Image (cartoon, rainbow, N blue to C red):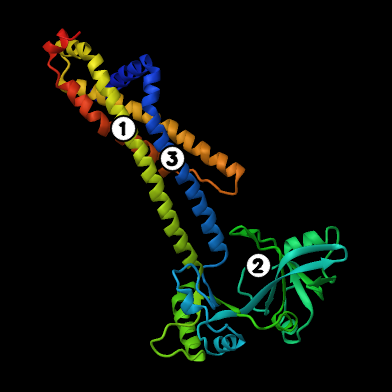
Amino acid sequence: MRTFIELWEAIKIAWSALSKNKLRAFLTLLGIIVGVTTVIGIVSITEGLDKAFGEEISSLGSNVLYVQKFPWAQQIDWDQIRNREDITMEEVKALEEYLTIPAAISPSTQTRRTVKYKSEFLEDVSITGTNEVKTSDVFPEYGRDLTAMDVHHRRLVCVIGWDVAETLFKNENPIGKRIKVGGYKFRIVGVLEKQGDVFGQSLDQEVRIPIGVFFKLFGSNRSLTITVKVENPEMIDQTRDQIRGILRRVRKVAPGAEDDFSVNQMDMIMDLYNSLTSTLYAAAIGVGAISLLVGGIGIMNIMLVSVTERTREIGIRKAIGAKRRNILWQFLVESIVISAIGGLIGIGLGFGIGKIIASISPLPTTITGWSIFLGIGFSSGVGIFFGLYPASKAAKLNPIESLRYE
């Protein structure tokens, strides 16, 4: 109980001392405010990005593998891999025949074309040639999806994305209507549910057609993406290994030679993102640490001035019975109070800046409890570290010499 009383008395004395020199105290706080604001602002933005990015990655599926010509998010030598052979339907057939782990296999290829209906049109729409196998969790909002009969008989039918339907058919039901895709007429059989954006790109500006029709109308001289959705996510690593073995045999890759294809997964992008944000975190902490160092030096300087100005007060307090630890505690608390006030202001400004950035840009922000504790911990730590020497100097003053001080 006595400790709390002493602490409260020390806080009141510290606050009184700061109130008498408001401008000096504010200038001392600036370094702490800038440091904490920098750290909190960047942390809140980065945390928001982490959350949004993680949600987008998880929406694309953690149990899905993508067999493609080139790898994702890796340090690669393009001179070595640019001449890789395309992924073709031969690889698709091999996986369908030899892959023993239960999985859905779907080839796809894309181009971009203008889509028209009467006088309405939408440019730069993603035209995807694929089969009827479902490897995503996206289903038609109304109508139906492509069927095996559509793919086998190469029917001129399509499933359109939500934005395509909204743009071309404002007040009409698109099912059964015919649209022009790159100059060719297709009958609409379904409209996909709204998906939103991923990595800033709309997933709703899409038209899906049978892959055989795609080859016939837009050409087959292009590399495919083979999407493999594993039924049991725990088998994802085994599936990847089995895919590599099958494709190395089909593509006649020599033993010991590197793969001439890539088996990609969303985790690769997440790993790259984490490595980038860790650099951002380090930069934020570095800038904040420099600002806090400057602020800490300012606190030490102001506390040394305060000790000099209040030398006679220290002598009086010691003369009436104050112990060294009482004096030490008083000045140390004053230093901590200065830092804590700067830290709280910095936390508020950091979150405010994050919210402003979120409101005027697509960058999201997230306020987390640990970032608040980080700001308070940083500022308090600075107060203790840089206030310890002035407090110790005040505690060691000789009471007789202090009373003589003018």
Within 10 Å of disc 1 (Cα), the crowding (few <14, some 14-19, many 20+) is many
**Among numbered discs 2 and 3, the one appearing first in the sequence:** 3
Residue at 73%, 62% in the rendered image: 162
Which percent across, then down, holds residue 159? 74, 71
Point out the tag, 1 or 2, that comes first from the N-terminus.
Answer: 2
Q: Are marks 3 and 1 in contact (CB under 8 Å)?
A: no
Badge 2 is on which residue? 138
Of the residues shown, which amino acid type is indicated by label 3? Thr
Quarter of the rendering occupied by the N terminus: top left
Up the image or down, 122 lies above or below 181; here it is above
Q: In this view, does 348 lie above or below 87?
A: above
Q: What element carries label 1?
A: helix
Q: Mark 3 or mark 1: which comes first in sequence?
A: 3
**Residue 282 placed where, x, y %?**
38, 50
Three-letter residue code for mark 1 = Gly
User: Label 3: which residue?
Assistant: 38
Vertical placement of 151 versus 16: above or below? below
Q: Can residue 230 be seen in this view?
A: no
Q: Residue at 26% across / 31% down in the picture?
A: 386
Left or right: 69 in relation to 1? right
Q: Mark 1 points at which residue?
A: 296
Residue 181 percent location from the top left of the image:
78, 72
Instruction: Please name the amino acid that badge 2 sits on.
Output: Val
The reply to whether the C-beta atoms of the residues labelled 1 and 2 are less than 8 Å apart is: no
Front residue of this view, candidates 365 and 176 = 365
Is label 2 in a helix, a strand or a loop?
loop
Q: Distance between the residues labelled 1 and 2?
A: 55 Å
Residue 381: quadrant of the picture: top left
